[in-house]
Amino acid sequence: MTVLTHTPTTRFSVPDQRFAAEPPERRGLARDQVRLLVADGRTGRLEHSRFDRLPDFLEPGDLVVVNNSQTIAAELDGTGEGNWPMVLHVATRLDDGSWVVELRTAPDAAEPILTAKPGQLFRFHAGTGGVLLRLLEPYPAAGHDSGPGGVGNRLWRAGIDSPVPFEQWLAWNGRPIGYGYLSGRWPLADYQTVFGLVPGSAEMPSAGRPFTAELVTRLVSAGVLIAPITLHTGVSS
């Protein structure tokens, strides 16, 4: 089993008006028309620009490292014992076959559920059959991360009983992870990057989102090198 041991040392709060409540395309912008902050390591100069100007700041032979992880549909509606509604966010599969998950409040996953206990059961139903989830233990340890001011456990290791491999069931029945601050719901395609080839990210590896096929072509044509790595993301909350 893979165990995460790093403990965050810094926390900060983002003002509500600074959350990205919708994709830029829903505001009439192209993907590569979002803002870009450029830091010159040689001079220390900072410049505010736009992402479609990225080729202006790179030189032939420069290397751009991109993430080829593909976002999966990792959110499900379910019910706890007593038939109370909840939302499940699926973070990752561990080496022993269990899964790291987060329980969130229904209907929009606005808040974490911190009152869960080991052994609790949750059910998820769909046309392709139901799934049963049992909480095993807090992940990676009790009280590791309950969130600012919270008491309880945010992430859990869970066992999942699925009629087909759970990755497949999730692909058929899940939807992209969302939170209460979003102004709407969008299809999984809106959460993919042009580099996404290897399924595995619970949430979008968003650093690569502003790239477009046209922008990549401009970079390559200018002699900029592009190297892919695979780095799957977990749940951002």
Image (spheres, grey):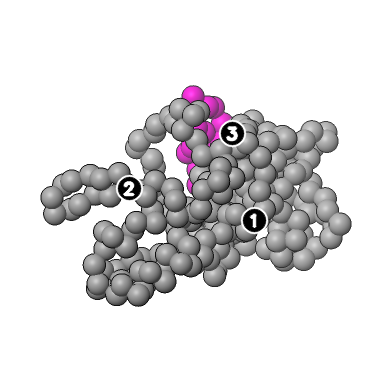
Q: Give the range drawn in magenta.
A: 140-155
Can residue 28 be seen from the camera position used here? yes
**Residue 186 falls left or right of residue 169:** left
Can residue 135 be seen from the camera position used here? no
Q: In this view, does 168 lie above or below 131?
A: below
Label 3 sits on residue: 181
Amino acid type of the residue tagged 2 in the rendering: Ser
SS at mark 2 in the image: strand
The span from disc 1 to disc 3 (Cα, nearest Å) is 18 Å
Q: Do the residues labelled 3 and 2 touch (CB within 8 Å)?
A: no
The location of residue 168, given as percent across then percent down, is: 71, 65
The span from disc 1 to disc 2 (Cα, nearest Å) is 28 Å
At x 37%, y 50%, the residue is: 50
The location of residue 162, given as percent across then percent down, is: 77, 60
**Dominant SS type (magenta):** loop
Q: Do the residues labelled 1 and 2 touch (CB within 8 Å)?
A: no
| Disc on the earlier residue, 3 or 2 | 2
Label 1 sits on residue: 188
SS at mark 3 in the image: loop
Q: In this view, does 137 lie above or below 66?
A: above
Q: Residue furthest top?
A: 149
Amino acid type of the residue tagged 1 in the rendering: Leu
| Disc on the earlier residue, 1 or 2 | 2
